[in-house]
Image (cartoon, rainbow, N blue to C red):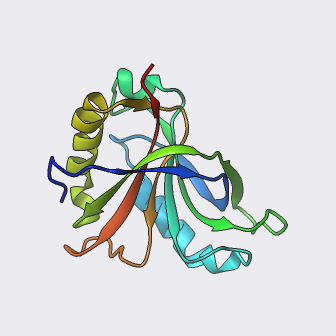
Amino acid sequence: MMNDTQQPVIKTLPPKLLIGKRIQTSLTDNKTFELWRSFMPRRSEIINNIGTDLYSMQVYKSPAHFENYNPSALFEKWAAVEVSDFDIVPVDMETYQLPGGLYAVFIHKGPASAGGKTFQYIYGTWVPASDYVLDDRPHFEILGEKYKNEDPDSEEEIWIPIKPKI
């Protein structure tokens, strides 16, 4: 669980190539579990992956998604892995070119279901008080070797796209 004093690490991400599955969802009708349940048994079909990290990515229709917050607003949710190229794409999977750029990287410690408090801190406290504003690029979480879903010792990286305030 995040405390209010945690500061993110600011990183510049190079562009990445991802292959995975996506769905349209919202916070009120959250289909994340269904997405991952359909992706995980098939991830071994992606043969050109780089590393073992999983990407849980959100693509919002516009920056106003956060300004006019509505938990019923639809967005695209991805379950994906990073790949070296798009030469071989498994049936029923799609490609995504994640643009590079500046990100605030937070660590969420604790069960995935407690992540809402971390996101409330990020969007409600950290972003408004920082020298940055949200940028119009995908938001994502990296589920690496320390990720254990509902385990209290689980850790995941939360990548929030930012740009300097003008």
Query: Could you tell whether 63 is left or right of 68 in the image?
Result: right
User: Residue 2, percent across and down?
Assistant: 19, 55
Quarter of the rendering occupied by the C terminus: top left
Q: Is residue 43 above or below residue 2?
A: below
Residue at position x 51%, y 35% in the image: 60
Q: Is residue 104 above or below residue 146?
A: above
User: Residue 13, percent across and down?
Assistant: 57, 52
Quarter of the rendering occupied by the N terminus: bottom left
Quarter where residue 165 is shown: top left
Residue at position x 31%, y 60% in the image: 107
Query: Could you tell whether 98 is left or right of 137 in the image?
Result: right
Q: Is residue 65 above or below residue 34?
A: above
User: Residue 129, percent across and down?
Assistant: 25, 30
User: Residue 65, percent across and down?
Assistant: 43, 27
**How many numbered circles are shown?**
0
Query: Could you tell whether 54 is left or right of 81 in the image?
Result: left
